[in-house]
Image (tube, rainbow, N blue to C red):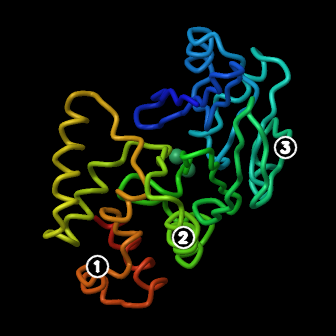
Amino acid sequence: MRVRQIPCLGDNYCHLIIDEETGSAAIVDPANGPKIAAVLHDEKVTLTHILCTHHHWDHTGGIPHLLDEFADLQVVAGAQDAERIKGTTLAVLDGQRFAVGELEAQVIDVPCHTRGHIAFLFDGALFSGDTLFVAGCGRFFEGDAAQMHKALNLRFAVLPPETKVYCGHEYTVSNLRFAQSLEPDNPALRAKLLWATAQCEAGHSTVPSTIGEELTTNPFMRLNSPEIQAATGATRPVQVMQRLRELKNAF
Ligand code: ZN
Ligand code: FE
């Protein structure tokens, strides 16, 4: 399995998942149809799947173009977002599995940013959309803090620490600045902010991360940190999550 990152629309990332054994490919969250089509021609792979983490236009805007240009596409979306994603052919539920070439994907339901937001887990790689960002998380547009806590800390945190995290946006530096305001003495955070700043200044991506790195740097996955509990004035996980989101929105 190989993943090619396609930057779109300023700060969105679309990820092309290629099964090198069969030449089949899946695109996660196609924001820009023509740009993705050009990459597909360049790679000489066969697009078989469009994988939608959620219905927002900056993750689905390229679908009509791809449906026009490529035949027999499976368009996969979470059951609760599917009616808002035109062209969906497969509305999936938590735990559902499907194949891209010889790769196996598993659906993880993570409602909150939207009520039908899902993540896709491949062997060693999580495609987290706008639920988990590097050092941050998505806004709670259609859900609440309890749901985001479940998604990040009960569903994602238990994945093997080396699992790569491919998210939907390049928000890393501002997320890390917020994180550092809460935990100024966290050495992993300081190192990652230096690295991410240099990456961005050089025009490079900070994605993917790993689950292990998120556990040491992402405040939304560090609800037990004494500094974070002090900064939020809360100790119960859902309350810490809620306060963190409010503080980040105002940061
Ligand atoms: Zn979104
Ligand atoms: Fe987005």
Measure the alpha-carbon separation of dots 2 and 3.
25 Å
Q: Is mark 3 within 8 Å of ligand 1?
A: no
Residue 124 versus residue 222 in the image, above or below: above
- Dividing the picture into quadrants, the one containing residue 15 is top right
Residue beneath disc 1:
228
Tell which circle, 2 or 3, labels the residue nearer the N-terminal end. 3
Q: Indicate the quadrant containing the C terminus: top left, top right, bottom left or bottom right.
A: bottom left
Pick whichever, 95 or 86, lies toward us.
95
Location of residue 58 in the rendering, given as x and y in whole percent from the top left corner: 56, 39
Residue beneath disc 3:
90
Q: Indicate the quadrant containing the N terminus: top left, top right, bottom left or bottom right.
A: top right
- Dividing the picture into quadrants, the one containing residue 95 is bottom right
For the point 56% across and 73% down, the residue is 154
Question: SS for tag 3?
Answer: strand
**Badge 1 amino acid:** Ile
Question: SS for tag 2?
Answer: helix
Measure the alpha-carbon separation of dots 1 and 3.
40 Å
**Badge 2 amino acid:** Met
For the point 24% across and 35% down, the residue is 199
Q: Is mark 1 within 8 Å of ligand 1?
A: no
Residue 12 versus residue 81 in the image, above or below: above
- Dividing the picture into quadrants, the one containing residue 170 is top left
Residue beneath disc 2:
148
Tell which circle, 1 or 3, labels the residue nearer the N-terminal end. 3
171 sits left or right of 154 in the view = left
**Badge 3 amino acid:** Leu
Measure the alpha-carbon separation of dots 2 and 1.
17 Å
Question: SS for tag 1?
Answer: helix
Tell which circle, 2 or 1, labels the residue nearer the N-terminal end. 2
Location of residue 33 in the rendering, given as x and y in whole percent from the top left corner: 63, 22
